[in-house]
Amino acid sequence: GINERTFLAIKPDGCQRRLVGEIIRRFERKGFHLVAMKMMQASETLLKEHYLALRDKPFYGRLVKYMSSGPVVAMVWQGLNVVKTARVMLGETNPADSLPGTIRGDFCVDISRNVIHGSDSFESAQREISLWFQPEELVCWQGASESWIYE
Ligand SMILES: Nc1ncnc2c1ncn2[C@@H]1O[C@H](COP(=O)(O)OP(=O)(O)OP(=O)(O)O)[C@@H](O)[C@H]1O
């Protein structure tokens, strides 16, 4: 939709490698609106809930441990078709399948150190935003003045 929102999180490897500015820059230049952001140490409780759908995977325990091993930058971005477009900008889950020009295609090689998370559907985005943020942490971006993006 026109003003849909997605949840992105720069993972501990992305933060450690100083990729935060580069990643924000890509989404800003694309034309999306940053409506919430915080650097935080995510708890295992939060991460287990976040990755609930993967709880039967053999890498689940390692994934949760890794994601809680250092700070992450949690963000909400808003704009036209942002859920799908952000996934395209991220690349594939496995960096080896990610084209150059995507974040994972440009900045990583290892599936368990793939720099960034992005919601995979509108429903996941809504679930993840409410899991990671309080409603009052999101600013209200007024989509009515869409024209300034392209000036
Ligand atoms: N085979 C694997 N081995 C190790 N880690 C994996 C593997 N598959 C997935 N992961 C990790 O689990 C995360 C979530 O996996 P999922 O299948 O939901 O992929 P995704 O939706 O592309 O990733 P994300 O949710 O981080 O955007 C991946 O980003 C990756 O870090």
Image (cartoon, rainbow, N blue to C red):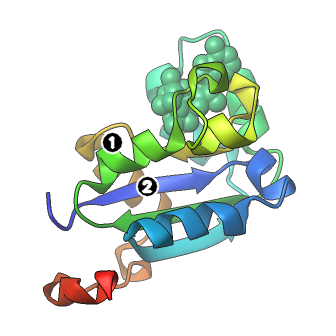
Image quarter (top left, top right, bottom left or bottom right) of the N terminus: bottom left
The amino acid type, in three-letter code, at marker 1 is: Ser
Q: Which picture quadrant has residue 120?
A: top left
Mark 1: which secondary structure?
helix
Residue 87 location, x and y as percent? 42, 41
Q: Quadrant of the C terminus?
A: bottom left
Residue 103 against residue 18 in the figure, above or below: above
Q: In this rendering, would 44 be left or right of 102? A: right
Callout 2: SS: strand
Q: Say few, some or many: other residues with alpha carbon within 10 Å of mark 2 (under 14 / 14 to 19 / 20 or more).
A: many
Q: Residue at x 19, y 90 (%)?
A: 145
Determine which residue is flagged by label 2: 7
| Left or right, 75 with reference to 120 | right
Q: Are marks 1 and 2 in contact (CB under 8 Å)?
A: yes
Residue 28 appears left or right of 79: right
Q: Quadrant of residue 138?
A: bottom left
Dot placed on the residue nearer the N-terminal end, 1 or 2: 2
Figure quadrant, ligand 1: top right
Query: 101 or 36, which is in the foreground?
Result: 101
Q: Residue 124's mark?
A: 1
Q: Position of residue 115 (x, y in %)?
A: 69, 43
Whether residue 127 is visible, yes or no, is no
How far from the left and from the top, in percent, is residue 9? 58, 53
For label 2, being within 8 Å of ligand 1 is answered no
Judged left or right of residue 15, residue 106 is left
Residue at coordinates 69% horizontally, 69% vertically from top-left? 21
Question: What amino acid does circle 2 point to?
Answer: Phe
